[in-house]
């Protein structure tokens, strides 16, 4: 079974520029998560999807962050405009509905300069 | 307000010995607990879990212990191997359906 695929692996942008991350979850996994991991910290949930519906986006900074999961499969996470404090690893994970055994992708390491 | 804490940022162990990683949580409503392992440049991978109705779950060299009264869980690895060197995150769930909250992680180094 193919794992969770994320792209790009690395991204360096200047502050105030936009950036987008893409995630392809494991086939058949209804639930998709975007987590952000700051250096030396654990992953923190940004948004959770059940199929195409965002069911928990309480931690998503909605003034600059947006996400979508069209057709309940792939998902994109966008930041516009990026700030220096957005530098982090952005992790996508997926699971079968109701399961906590998430499968994570390798993440996108974002550096904002 | 940190609901999940891993107070040891790092742990160094000799190969063959036991590694004990600890995790404390604050909310007694959490009812499902997991450990994830993370290698550099990879995403975390699921290792072992335990529900609140148990106090121990074992899978090969890995055992997770849960002490609900102390709101504490631990991961025991025995015997430790150099390939176990990684960052270990505890994750807790139960207060919000589908949401895992992670600790800060502990870097385990197993020396040959």
Image (tube, coloured by chain):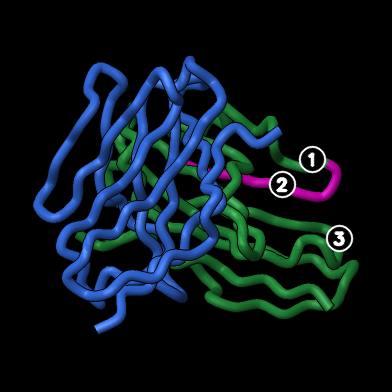
Chain colours: A green, B blue
Would you name the residue on which mark 3 appears? Answer: A81
Whether label 1 touches label 3, CB < 8 Å: no
Could you say whether the residue bearing mark 3 is in a helix, strand or loop? loop
Q: Residue at x 88, y 71 (%)?
A: A15
Q: Which residues are magenta?
A: A63-72
Q: Residue at x 67, y 64 (%)?
A: A88
Q: Quadrant of the N terminus of chain B?
A: top right
Query: Which chain does the numbered disc 1 sit on?
Result: A
Mark 3 packing: few (<14 Cα in 10 Å), some, or many (20+)? Answer: some
Disc 1/disc 3 C-alpha distance (Å): 12 Å
Is B12 situated left or right of A92 in this image? left
Q: Residue at x 76, y 57 (%)?
A: A79
Would you name the residue on which mark 2 appears? Answer: A66
| Label 1 or label 3, whichever comes before in sequence order | 1
In this view, B8 is above or below B80: above
Label 3 and label 2 in one chain: yes
Whether label 2 touches label 1, CB < 8 Å: yes
State the residue in front, B65 or A7.
B65
State the residue in front, B93 or B64.
B64
Mark 2 packing: few (<14 Cα in 10 Å), some, or many (20+)? Answer: some
Would you name the residue on which mark 1 appears? Answer: A62
Residue, far left: B60
Give coordinates of residue B104: x percent, y percent.
Answer: 56, 52
Give coordinates of residue A26: x percent, y percent.
Answer: 31, 52
């Amino acid at each position: 079974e193919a794992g969770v695929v994320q792209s790009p692996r690395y991204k360096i942008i200047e502050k105030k520029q936009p950036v987008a991350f893409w995630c392809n979850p494991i086939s058949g996994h209804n639930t998709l998560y975007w987590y952000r991991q700051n250096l030396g910290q654990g992953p923190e949930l940004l948004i959770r999807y059940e199929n195409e519906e965002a069911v928990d986006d309480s931690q998503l900074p909605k003034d600059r962050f947006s996400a979508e999961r069209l057709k309940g499969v792939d998902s994109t996470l966008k930041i516009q405009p990026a700030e220096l404090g957005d530098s982090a690893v952005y992790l996508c994970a997926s699971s079968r509905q109701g399961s906590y055994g998430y499968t994570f992708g390798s993440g996108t390491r974002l550096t904002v300069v | 307000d940190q609901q999940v804490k891993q107070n040891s940022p790092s742990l160094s162990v000799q190969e063959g010995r036991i590694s004990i990683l600890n995790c404390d949580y604050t909310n007694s409503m959490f009812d499902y607990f997991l450990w994830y392992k993370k290698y550099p440049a990879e995403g975390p991978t699921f290792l072992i879990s335990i529900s609140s109705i148990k106090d121990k779950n074992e899978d090969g060299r890995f055992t997770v212990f849960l002490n609900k009264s102390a709101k504490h869980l631990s991961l025991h690895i025995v015997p430790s191997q150099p390939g176990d060197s990684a960052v270990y995150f505890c994750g807790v769930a139960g207060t919000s359906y589908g949401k895992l909250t992670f600790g800060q992680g502990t870097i385990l180094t197993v020396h040959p």
